[in-house]
Image (spheres, rainbow, N blue to C red):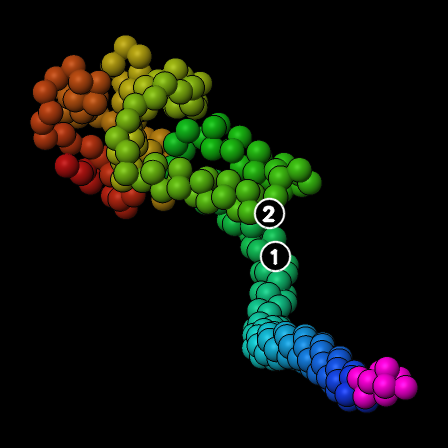
């Protein structure tokens, strides 16, 4: 009886301890779960915060890209306007070139014709080569493989050659009709001012009268001074004052120094 009572008393005293232990374990478990849940929640919050920051950064980048695109769009718009103006200028220029091309072809034909007329009325300087040059120009005008610009340059070159004849002092051998006979002579010309022919023997001299477009023989008294002029040009004598009859003068007795 006493033993049973002691056991009952022990049980009575031990039961509150076990109850307290169970409650403590339960509380500890709850706290652990709470801490774990809080940690997981914090982790989720941290993850969401990271994503939020990432999204903010991405939004800022997109905003910057949009601003850049807006600037670029404005640049392209200005560039397009500028290109339209340039295209308009080019179209006007092309039209101008077309108009010039239409006008320059007739001009070139007139230039060749006028040059041919000029040669026919000019002193008979290098007549064969000059007439040949005119024929080449006329043939060139009909060639499709030569551009209009090159044709124009060739015509200008021919005009330059004609200009050069007006400033040269030279002698060339020619066969020309003199006193009713074809004679081989040396022809001296001083630009377009004077043109004198000398027989190969040096005993006969003629000068060309542009107004009458014919050759006139020169008196023997003038032969010495004329020979001196030829010698100076031939460089057979030192440069000196030379006397030549004027081919452009009205009077046969006029002379030029």
Q: Quadrant of residue 123?
A: top left
Task: Please give the residue where the numbered disc 2 appears in the rendered image.
Answer: 148
Residue 25 in the image: state x and y as whole percent.
Answer: 75, 80
Which element is circle 2 on?
helix
For the residues labelled 1 and 2, say whether their Cβ atoms are less than 8 Å apart. yes
Task: Please give the residue where the numbered disc 1 appears in the rendered image.
Answer: 101
Q: Is residue 61 left or right of residue 227?
A: right
Residue 137 in the image: state x and y as whole percent.
Answer: 56, 38
Task: Classify the position of the N terminus by image quarter.
Answer: bottom right
Q: Residue furthest top?
A: 201
The residue sitting at 28% across, 38% down in the picture is 167
Q: Which residues are magenta?
A: 1-10
Q: Quadrant of residue 5?
A: bottom right
Is residue 183 at least partly visible in the picture?
yes
Q: Is residue 120 left or right of residue 26?
A: left
- Per the model, the C-alpha gap separating discs 1 and 2 is 8 Å
Q: Main secondary structure of the magenta part?
A: helix
Q: Is residue 18 left or right of residue 139?
A: right
The residue sitting at 46% across, 39% down in the picture is 158
Residue 134 in the image: state x and y as whole percent.
Answer: 53, 37
28 in magenta: no
Foreground residue among 158 and 184: 158
Residue 221 in the image: state x and y as whole percent.
Answer: 15, 24
Foreground residue among 157 and 231: 157
The residue sitting at 36% across, 18% down in the picture is 173
Which element is circle 1 on?
helix
Foreground residue among 136 and 236: 136
């Amino acid at each position: 009886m006493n033993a049973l009572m002691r056991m009952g008393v022990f049980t009575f005293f031990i039961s509150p301890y076990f109850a307290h232990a169970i409650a403590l374990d339960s509380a500890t478990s709850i706290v652990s779960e709470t801490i774990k849940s809080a940690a997981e929640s914090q982790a989720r919050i941290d993850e969401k915060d990271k994503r939020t920051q990432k999204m903010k950064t991405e939004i800022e980048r997109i905003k910057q890209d949009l601003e850049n695109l807006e600037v670029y769009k404005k640049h392209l718009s200005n560039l397009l306007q500028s290109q339209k103006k340039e295209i308009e200028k080019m179209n006007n220029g092309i039209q101008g070139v077309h108009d010039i091309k239409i006008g320059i072809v007739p001009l070139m034909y007139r230039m060749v014709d006028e040059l041919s007329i000029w040669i026919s009325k000019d002193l008979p300087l290098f007549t064969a080569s000059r007439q040949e040059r005119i024929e080449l120009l006329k043939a060139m005008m009909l060639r499709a493989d030569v551009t209009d610009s090159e044709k124009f340059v060739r015509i200008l070159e021919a005009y330059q050659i004609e200009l050069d004849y007006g400033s040269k002092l030279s002698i060339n051998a020619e066969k020309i009709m003199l006193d009713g006979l074809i004679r081989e002579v040396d022809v001296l010309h001083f630009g377009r001012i004077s043109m004198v022919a000398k027989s190969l023997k040096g005993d006969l001299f003629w000068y060309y009268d542009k107004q009458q477009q014919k050759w006139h023989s020169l008196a023997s008294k003038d032969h010495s001074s004329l020979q001196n002029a030829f010698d100076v040009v031939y460089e057979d004598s030192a440069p000196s004052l030379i006397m030549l009859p004027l081919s452009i003068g009205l009077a046969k007795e006029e002379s030029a120094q």
